[in-house]
Amino acid sequence: MRLGLALRAFWQAMFDPRVAERVALALDGTDPVAPNSVTFSPVIAEQKSAEPVKPKSLQSDAVTLLAALQRDARLVDLIHEDLDQYGDGQVGAAARPCLKQCRQTLDRLLVIEPLVDAAEGQSIPVDAAASSARVRWVGESAGATQGKVVHAGWQASQVQLPAWSGSEGDAMVIAPTQVQAS
């Protein structure tokens, strides 16, 4: 019986603002007003409409960043190239300018900094409550409160990706097809 009641309340609250208001009052422990006498406070409506709504970009930040790396450094081309047909020297020679340009692009779009100010091999204290996104133990670490830095990690302290202004149909395009007149 309670499951049925919960489902009815859910669906009616989804589509009827008066029911949603009564459900909210009931959940807050206030006696809901009779169904025919529900009124809405204009102050609440004004507060909700006064909040600025940021339009959601049609292109994801990931596609925007990948498109910039492809445009500036042809990173996707390098990654999708069959590298087995080339020697290590050739791959290195092709990767060097690509990687340099990728760094310039990242430096232009992001401010990337080390996560900790410590050199590799240096011991640092590690808080027991440290987030696994910030600290990843390598090897045995049971109960450790200090460890040697294997990699300092990276964080973006600023992101300045360009806003997408194209059409919805083109939002997933990383690089356009290049065509030469024949």
Image (cartoon, rainbow, N blue to C red):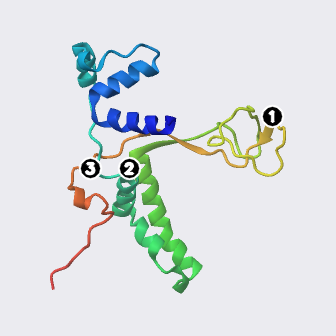
Q: Give the alpha-carbon distance from disc 1 to disc 2, as whole Å.
A: 36 Å
171 in relation to 36, above or below = below
Q: Looking at the image, which is closer to me, 121 or 131?
A: 131
35 in relation to 153, above or below = above
Taking the spot 39% from the left edge, 58% from the top edge, the residue there is 66
Question: SS for tag 1?
Answer: loop
Q: Which residue is mark 3?
A: 164
Q: Give the alpha-carbon distance from disc 3 to disc 2, as whole Å.
A: 9 Å
Amino acid type at circle 3 is: Trp
Which badge, 1 or 2, comes first in the chain's sequence?
A: 2
Taking the spot 33% from the left edge, 15% from the top edge, the residue there is 33
Q: Is residue 128 visible?
A: yes
Q: Which residue is mark 1?
A: 145
Amino acid type at circle 1 is: Thr
Q: Are marks 3 and 2 in contact (CB under 8 Å)?
A: no
Crowd rating for badge 2 (residues with CA inside 10 Å; few <14, some 14–19, many 20+)? some
Q: Is residue 104 left or right of residue 153?
A: left
Give percent across and percent down for residue 155. 54, 42
Which badge, 1 or 3, comes first in the chain's sequence?
A: 1
Taking the spot 74% from the left edge, 46% from the top edge, the residue there is 137
Q: Looking at the image, which is closer to me, 107 or 130?
A: 130
Q: Which residue is mark 2?
A: 61
Give percent across and percent down for residue 17. 28, 28
Question: SS for tag 2?
Answer: helix
Crowd rating for badge 1 (residues with CA inside 10 Å; few <14, some 14–19, many 20+)? few
Q: Are marks 1 and 3 in contact (CB under 8 Å)?
A: no
Q: Are marks 1 and 2 in contact (CB under 8 Å)?
A: no
129 in relation to 72, above or below = above
Q: Quadrant of residue 178?
A: bottom left
